[in-house]
Image (cartoon, coloured by chain):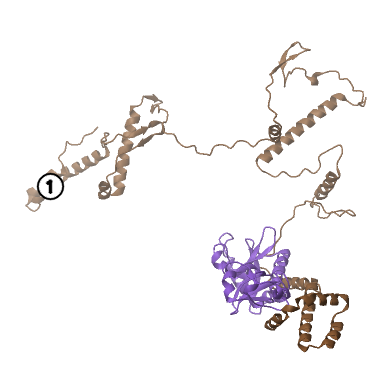
Amino acid sequence: MRPLTEEETKVMFEKLSKYIGENIKLLVDRPDGTYCFRLHQDRVYYMSEKILKLATNFSRDKLISVGTCFGKFTKTTKFRLHVTALDFLAPYAKFKVWVKPGAEQSFLYGNHVLKSGLGRITENTMQYQGVVVYSMADVPLGFGVAAKSTQECRRVDPMSIVVFHQADVGEFIRNEDTLT
Amino acid sequence: MRTSGCCPRPGSTLPCFSGFARGELSVQKMAASSVEELLAKAEQEEAEKLKSITVQKELDLDFDLGNLLACDKNRIETRDFREQKKEDFLRSLARDNTQLLINEIWKLPTERVEEVIVAKLPEPTTRLPREKPPLKPRPPTKWEQFAKLKGIQKKKKTNLVWDETAKEWKRRWGYKRANDDTKEWLIEVPETADPNEDQFAKRVKAKKERVAKNEFNRLKNIARAQKVKTPGVGLVPKAQQSRNELAKAVSVAKVSTASVGRFQDDLPKEKPPKNSGKRRKFDPLIGDFSSEKQKQLDLLKTMGSKKPRLDITKAVNQQMREEDKEEAAAKRRKGGGKRGRKGNMTGKGKAGKAGGGGKAGKAGGGGKRRGKPGKK
């Protein structure tokens, strides 16, 4: 486990800012304690200072997870968000998409959101903007990337993709063995 | 050697104890009996020490005297094992088997060497696994690799060669070799060579260099075989150094000071050496949290500032939306004249007009659309 280097931090923040914009500040600077990002086996974990100090008691190969896993760095040093980060993305999300109850299941099975399943979408959403996907009951289901801007969404036919799937809470079951 | 059996067993003296309280006679008797008893006990102990050298076994043991090994294939009676004390049972079993092994050794031809009886053991028959793993084949040298690639095969040369001057067969290499050029007393000076150059010294020098080069290659092969990283050779003497080699030489020379080049000034316009080792250095795991936080916040600030002020897509979208709204509003009002005026105000220049033209086609869905913006 180690702190992220400047470059790694930048790459990760750039990815996070696609979803929560400048709200990353609220994750870095929290009034309820010191929280930090740590890299462990290519994965970035977000944890409080207290947990970090406890985790130092474990050797590197024995430590599987600590705090919340935000995602991982690929071998090409890109950052990939995991669904475990949803708890921190959902409250600060700038752009949201609500899916209709009928399309919820399809999204939770890892499919893209089609226009027919789109309930609501935040105004001003640009194309390729990171969005958090909610059910109509405001339960965060996952996140993705807007395939069309809000304007375009209104015009496209019902079978075209509106949000590209990136992660959904169904992964907690599907990828149970790899999620940490 | 065995002398047991000449004394009465302790069992026979036991009745004496019954007359314990019958008076003097009985006391005398008792004294005598106790002596007998003691003797008997001693006898028995003696006998136990010198147990028989014959051991009865249902199945004969397998012997491998070369390894001093005996294998007992007889079943162990679990009942015996449980009834007796386990330790005692195992000890007696081991004792018996050892006795058998020693009996077998005594059957071998023996001789006396310096007051000691020595038996010659036969060859071992049990194959034991080797202690260490078998050696790996030596990794090929650079030349062997090259030869394999090119298909060059070793040719056996005869050891003896005909020496024309000495008129006899001589060894090809080494001391007293045939056609030995070091023994020449005269060397012709080549036409192109400098007449003042010592041709003998030149030959000796060339030979020394060849030996040194060979030695260097040998060491490189060893290093490669053991996967040891050899330090880069900074300066190999060469007739003509290339640009890269010169740059390398400079960088090597620079760090070849007592302080590893720490106080060495850069030359004007000198570039940093390429491919120099770079050390990864990370912050401590539990360091200064506040400075870490500050660094991240600073990073966020710079990241935010770099974003373009005017996002073109966003601006276009906004423009489109405004136009949509106005269009819808105009429709509701159904005002012909007003509509024209509005169009002039909003449509800034040609682009606005062109956009307006495009919109006319899409206007059919306007009614549907109007509901959605309200939902947000």
Q: Which quadrant of the structure image shows residue A111?
A: bottom right
- Who's the residue at 80% across and 19% down the image? B183
In the picture shown, does residue B220 fall above or below A129? Answer: above
Neighbourhood count class around disc 1 (C-alpha, 10 Å): few under 14, some 14–19, many 20 upward = few
**For residue B182, side relative to residue A60 (left or right):** right
Q: Secondary structure at mark 1?
A: helix
- Who's the residue at 47% across and 37% down the image? B129
Q: Chain of mark 1?
A: B
- Tell me, yes or no, if residue A40 can be seen here: yes
**For residue B296, side relative to residue A103 (left or right):** right
Q: Which chain is purple?
A: A
**For residue B27, side relative to residue B279 (left or right):** left
Q: Position of residue A170 (x, y in %)?
A: 56, 68
- Who's the residue at 60% across and 79% down the image? A138
Q: Where does label 1 land, which residue?
A: B14
**Quarter holding the N terminus of chain B?**
top left
Instruction: Identify which amino acid the numbered label 1 is placed on.
Output: Leu
Work out whether residue A163 or residue B247 is closer to the camera in this orientation and state it: A163
Work out whether residue A149 or residue B302 is closer to the camera in this orientation and state it: A149
Q: Position of residue B74 (x, y in %)?
A: 30, 39
- Who's the residue at 14% across and 46% down the image? B31
Q: Which chain is brown?
A: B
Work out whether residue B300 or residue B204 is closer to the camera in this orientation and state it: B300
Q: Position of residue B102 (x, y in %)?
A: 34, 33
Q: Which quadrant of the structure image shows residue B120?
A: top left
